[in-house]
Image (cartoon, rainbow, N blue to C red):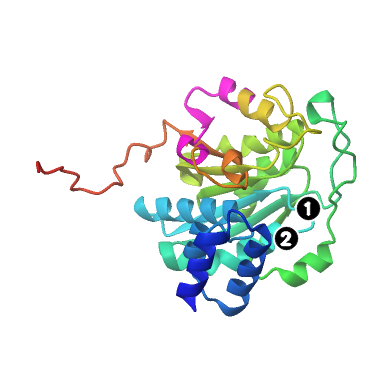
């Protein structure tokens, strides 16, 4: 059965989008393929979540961490947190690292845009509010960090004492909210891995959003880089080269803290000698 699914996926997925959905549902129901195999075949519902969490957990393991945290900034209805929980055990098995999950939200939906930088032509106050009680019935281990991120970013580490951050999913839509959320990165080395993948949902968009580096999340990223000498949020060029019909690789960025005590720790294979043939 597994070989049949893999064969069909490799032959038809790029030109038959409905087949992807069918195979994805079959894999989820019958557990035919592992999450890694589904990722390689572009079958996962949220490949960016799996990629960021797994790579962060594996880096944590390479650096000797036993626990690591994944943050979702902008929970909305909660489907993202539910998905993170659904892949958590497999990522823990693959990495050997225990994962903690935290979701940041006001529960009241988007606030009122502060300026043109928040794209008021696209977003309105109240979009994406949360039914807290309904979401809590679906969550098993995630912790909700409720409140304005401008304030919760200041109290998060003291209040929750999370394991070091290994991946972050940014989906707060606004420039202002993203800029406030990025203050989480101004923490002690012990609270964060030296580098990790971040998913910024609102950096590509479509013809109506018209995202540039002068508004929205891209502006918040640009200003963060200008304001920090020892930390930057940059482009993972190897992901930009992926040939896929889905745009998630274009929304992945890498946070790096060059002054982190573990940034230069060697994690690659010890024997990289190339023999003369």
User: Which residue position is annotated with label 1?
Assistant: 76
Residue at (20, 48) in percent of width and height? 270
| Res 242 label | none
x%, y% of residue 164?
50, 50
User: Which residue position is annotated with label 2?
Assistant: 79
Q: Is residue 230 magenta?
A: yes
Quadrant of residue 206 in the image? Answer: top right
Residues 119 and 191: in front is 119
The alpha-carbon separation of the residues under discs 2 and 1 comes to 8 Å
x%, y% of residue 177?
74, 36
Above or below residue 211? Residue 265 is below
x%, y% of residue 198?
57, 43
Mark 1 falls on what kind of element? loop
Could you tell whether 25 is left or right of 93 in the image? right
Residue at (85, 35) in percent of width and height? 122
Could you tell whether 144 is left or right of 90 in the image? right
Residues tagged 2 and 1 counted as in contact (Cβ below 8 A): yes
Q: Does the magenta stretch include residue 176?
A: no
Category of crowding for the residue at label 2, using alpha-carbon neighbours closer than 10 angstroms: few (below 14), some (14–19), many (at least 20): few
Q: Can residue 161 be seen in this view?
A: no
Q: In which quarter of the image is the C terminus?
A: top left
Could you tell whether 44 is left or right of 173 in the image? left
Mark 2 falls on what kind of element? helix
* Farthest-out residue, left: 276
The part of the chain drawn in magenta is: 223-240
Residue at (54, 54) in percent of width and height? 69
x%, y% of residue 53?
53, 54
Could you tell whether 40 is left or right of 168 in the image? left
Q: Can residue 14 be seen in this view?
A: yes
């Amino acid at each position: 059965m597994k070989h049949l699914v893999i064969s069909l996926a490799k032959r038809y997925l790029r030109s038959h989008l409905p087949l992807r959905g069918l195979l994805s549902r079959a894999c989820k129901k019958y557990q035919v393929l592992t999450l890694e195999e589904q990722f390689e075949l572009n079958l996962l519902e949220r490949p960016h979540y799996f990629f960021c969490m797994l790579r962060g957990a594996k880096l944590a393991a390479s650096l000797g961490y036993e626990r690591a945290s994944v943050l979702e900034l902008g929970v909305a209805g909660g489907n993202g947190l539910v998905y993170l929980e659904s892949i958590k055990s497999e990522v823990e098995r693959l990495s050997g690292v225990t994962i903690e999950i935290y979701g940041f939200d006001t529960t009241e939906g988007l606030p009122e845009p502060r300026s043109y930088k928040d794209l008021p032509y696209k977003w309105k106050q109240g979009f994406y509010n949360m039914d807290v009680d309904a979401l809590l019935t679906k969550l098993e281990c995630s912790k909700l960090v409720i409140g304005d991120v401008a304030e919760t970013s200041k109290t998060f580490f003291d209040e929750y004492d999370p394991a070091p951050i290994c991946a972050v999913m940014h989906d707060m839509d606004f420039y202002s909210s993203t800029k406030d959320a990025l203050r989480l990165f101004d923490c002690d080395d012990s609270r964060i891995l030296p580098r990790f993948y971040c998913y910024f949902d609102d950096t590509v968009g479509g013809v109506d959003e018209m995202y540039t580096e002068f508004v929205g999340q891209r502006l918040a990223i640009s200003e963060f880089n200008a304001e920090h000498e020892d930390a930057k949020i940059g482009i993972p060029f190897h992901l930009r080269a992926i040939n896929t019909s889905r745009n998630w690789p274009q929304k992945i960025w890498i946070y790096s803290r060059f002054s982190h005590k573990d940034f230069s720790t060697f994690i690659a294979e010890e024997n990289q000698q190339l023999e003369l043939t």
